[in-house]
Amino acid sequence: MKLALFASTPRGRRLAQALLSLLPEEWICWSKANPQGEPLPWPWQAYGDPSHPTAPRSLAAAVAQTWPQVQGCLFILPVGSVVRLIAPLLQDKYRDPAVVVVDESGRWAISLCGGHVGGADALARQVAAALGAEPILTSASEGLGIPPVDVLGHPYGWRRGSGDWNGVAAALTRGEPVAVEQTCGTQLWRRAWPADHPLLTTAPDQAVAQIRIGEYTTPCPHIPTVHWHPRVLWVGVGCERGTSRAWLEGSLRRLLQNQGLALEAVAGLATLELKRDEAGLLELAQAHGWPIQFFSAAALAGIPVPHPSEAVRQAVGTPSVAEAAALLAAQRWSGEDNPAQGRATLVCPKQIFTSESEGACTLAIARAAREYSPRAGHLWLIGIGPGDPAQLTLAARLALAQAEVVIGYQLYLDLVAPLLHPGQICEAFPITQEVQRAQRAIALAQQGLQVAVISSGDAGIYGMAGLVLEYLARSGWDGIRPSLEVLPGISALQAAAARLGAPLMQDFCAISLSDRLTPWPAIEQRLQAAAQADFVVALYNPRSRQRLDPFLKALQIFRRARPTHTPVAVARNLYRPGEAIHLTTLGELDPEQVDMFTLVLIGSSQTFRYGSRLITPRGYRL
């Protein structure tokens, strides 16, 4: 996304610097020229500079020059000034860039123009997260807590079709019954809507408006209707050498129109390997952003089709190109292990289109069971820290603002709920289903979604980062699609140390007592080694209702290896409601004070208690 940033004053530029470093966008930056003539610091360009006659002479000129070049404009200016600057440039919400305004004190990030389609609401959330500001979003859908209908399909790679978008949006805003008719594509979008919303329960005969999701271009009824088209159609193409792009495209449009199918529902093209250099075919795919799947004659020959041709087999080695390629492409995209018995269906058998001057082509269309999305998908593996939003990192806040799906244990979702927004899908899993969480997150990211997987503390310390990366590696992940970031958080060990003072000033270790993923003999061996090595030791997952023995055995190991007066801290629900820290000794520690929400910190021989603090000397001679 290419953005423009306008800040007229040095104060505004200082505020903007945080955004330039935190938001990974391509920026065009404008500010007023210095009165003394000194150049502005990089990357700022100056307007109103008499020494550069080609530079814009005013802020209005700079805005007008930049407006058609960017997808978004961020102004650090008064709202009234911005309104007057952009008013002459506005056309409609489908062409105008997003406009966000921030006050110079950095308290507010206002989505002024292009909230839904332009992306101003999303940009305002990111800017607010980066600055610690409050996002000001005034769209009706935001107030109702529902996704905007005009961006409903974007996360899934759907394409917008025709319809009365304003009419349907108005009906939703008024809370009137809006029906949904869906023939293909994921149902995941329903998870972003409140369960009691009329949209999910309205019968067609009760509706005052309608949303149609599918591959067909059905006539609109006498109520406001809009169309979203999941990309499920794969077009098989066979053609003479040299067939023009114009003839291919015209033929395809005629075929789609005759079948009542939407061009927007086309996922891509499929053909014979011999056509890799077919110019007209390549130009058609490039013009529409369609991928092309190329198949060998042997692969196509193995696909049963309704209209095989002996003449085609003799010419290219397979009895079918168009029908077989369409089916095979749809089957492979659907992820079917056995293409010959897959769920893909041939919705349009082959048809031949000929032109004496432009060539000839054969077209067939198959529908995949799963829609194609050109989006690469992204995974954020986020450590949310101990639970207090004040302890959440800025990078984590930015990721949560951008995520389309947030996955985690219900308690963790509750902790970050104030940072989430309407339209995001939240999927909660029980505390014992970490593997399922990882697999679900990967599957959604592979579909092109932006997925945040949250762990308490740090995602890389007894968190979800290991499982997600392990399953990606097992699946043959190329390290690129989906892309992935691990965002660190404050671990329970660090949170406890901060509350206690300075217990980790020498070598320390952490050991989880949960034997769900690690066999107990391995845990016991580590406990004995750590106890003998005189580490400060943090015990994670010490005790649950079903797991009582591991903590008692660990306590016995440390009591045999260390003096009974060794300081111990029992820290529960750190930085959350109900926080409790109890200082005791190894000999007096009561196991009944310990549960799964507790971290037990056992001091070394050097650790001592001072009031409510634990201190492990750093080692310097004082």
Image: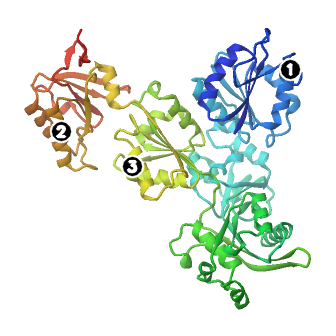
Crowd around label 3: few <14 · some 14–19 · many ≥20 (10 Å) = some
The residue where tag 3 is placed is 467
The residue where tag 1 is placed is 52
Q: Earlier in the sequence, mark 3 or mark 2?
A: 3
Visual colour scheme: rainbow
Residue 586 location, quadrant: top left
Q: Secondary structure at mark 1?
A: loop
The amino acid beneath tag 3 is Leu
Q: Secondary structure at mark 3?
A: helix
Closest to the camera, between mark 1 and mark 2, is 1
Do tag 3 and tag 2 residues touch (Cβ < 8 Å)?
Answer: no
Q: Secondary structure at mark 2?
A: helix
* Numbered circles on residues, count: 3
The amino acid beneath tag 2 is Leu
As measured in the structure, the alpha-carbon distance from the residue carrying label 1 to the one carrying label 3 is 57 Å
Crowd around label 2: few <14 · some 14–19 · many ≥20 (10 Å) = many
Q: Point out the image quarter for the N terminus.
A: top right
Q: Residue at x 37, y 41 (%)?
A: 463
As measured in the structure, the alpha-carbon distance from the residue carrying label 1 to the one carrying label 2 is 71 Å
Q: Nearer the viewer, residue 120 or 270?
A: 270
Give the vertical position of 51 relative to 563 (above or below): above
In this picture, residue 341 sits left or right of residue 206:
left
As measured in the structure, the alpha-carbon distance from the residue carrying label 3 to the one carrying label 2 is 24 Å
* Percent of width and height locating residue 195: 55, 48
The residue where tag 2 is placed is 527
- Name the mark on residue 479: none
Q: Earlier in the sequence, mark 1 or mark 3?
A: 1
* Percent of width and height locating residue 449: 57, 49
